[in-house]
Image: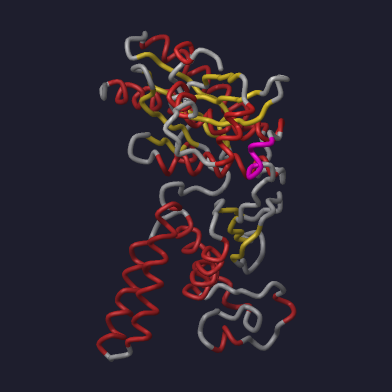
Amino acid sequence: MDRLEDLPDDPGVYRFLNCKGEILYIGKSVHLRRRVRSYLRRDGGHSRQTERLKFEARSVEVLATGSELAALLLEGQLIRHHLPPFNQAQKRYRQYPFLRLSIQEEFPRLHLTRVLAADGAEYYGPYTQTGFVQWIAQLLSAALGIRGCEDLSAVHHGCLLDQLGKCLGPCRDRSIRLEYGLRVEQLRSLLRGEELPGVIDQFEERMLQAAEREEFEQAIVWRNRAQALKSFFTHQAQVRERVTLDAVAVQPGPGRTVQVFWIQQGKLTALQNFQANGSDAEARRAVEQMSKAYYSRTREAEPVFTHQPRDLDEIQLVSSWLYRHRLDADLLWLSDCNPEQVPGLVLTQIRAAHRRF
């Protein structure tokens, strides 16, 4: 093995190689030196696969990335390219589900999909619990009267959901277009994490009313619905934009640095590091140049993602990272900003992060 003391203790990616120089395993860590050292301890506690990796490995290579998020993304890219034998579980792309709201249709519906398409619909996610998210989609649709049928033209006299009061029934009455549109706007707000407290309050009020009537089974149903919404939107309320989110995240980094992550359409496009004792004028110049390049890319970008599985993996990694660091990273949602104001807003966040040291 290479000399441990020569390895950086920064965020990055490490690779174990065999005697032929072939890559056996690729991993990532916030502290590279500590992570590699953990493989060499002699007190046992390793899995059988790790013991086998230690037996076959002859050297280790590391690449510092400067940030945890960059390490996450680079690890995934390298694993997909090299397909190391000890990364078996990560050889295949994970097919993350998204929620699709078909706003391009006269009467939109909300449903689960694993394919992103440039079809005018809005996509939210990605998520990991398919069954749970499917249930949430049905719950929200029923609560707001949003249709669940795939083909509106196939039904003309209403359906069971219509009869139960869980759908406004656009199949039998097209005159509800205005009311239906208002419900869809409320659904869009909910999917962005807005108006959620009001809906949960309604569910909890119905729970109390059912309990007062001693309808305890129904009370449990409303309680479970309220708890499910709280759980689901814990993530969605933080990453509150559609899949095409554009944002800047500012976070204190290692060694008294401040890191600025430029996120475009859910994917990391650039990372900047600013020293705590650096020149304010230089920081302003660097941020202005990055902002200009960012908006230049935005004008050229497609309205939604391509269908490549690597895009879905990267969106999931970025959104999960944003959620995990919701307390220590300041987020600037660029969809809410005038492009001319962005450099000044980012600099304000950088200065605020410097004051934390």
- Overall secondary structure of the magenta section: helix
Name the image colouring: secondary structure
Choose between 136 and 94: the one closer to the eye: 94
Instruction: Say whether residue 145 is magenta.
Output: no
Residue 244 in the image: x percent, y percent? 58, 44
Q: Could you tell me if residue 340 is visible in this image? A: no
Choose between 156 and 252: the one closer to the eye: 252
Q: Quadrant of residue 78?
A: top right
At 33% from the left and 80% from the top, the residue drawn is: 206
Magenta part of the protein: which range? Answer: 85-90
Quadrant (top left, top right, bottom left, bottom right) of the C terminus: top left
At 55% from the left and 54% from the top, the residue drawn is: 128
Choose between 201 and 73: the one closer to the eye: 73
Q: In which quarter of the image is residue 98?
A: bottom right
Residue 272 in the image: x percent, y percent? 48, 20
**Horizontal relation, residue 279 to residue 104: left or right:** left
What is the tally of numbered marks visible in this picture? 0
Instruction: Say whether residue 86 is magenta.
Output: yes
Residue 106 in the image: x percent, y percent? 65, 67
Choose between 76 and 340: the one closer to the eye: 76
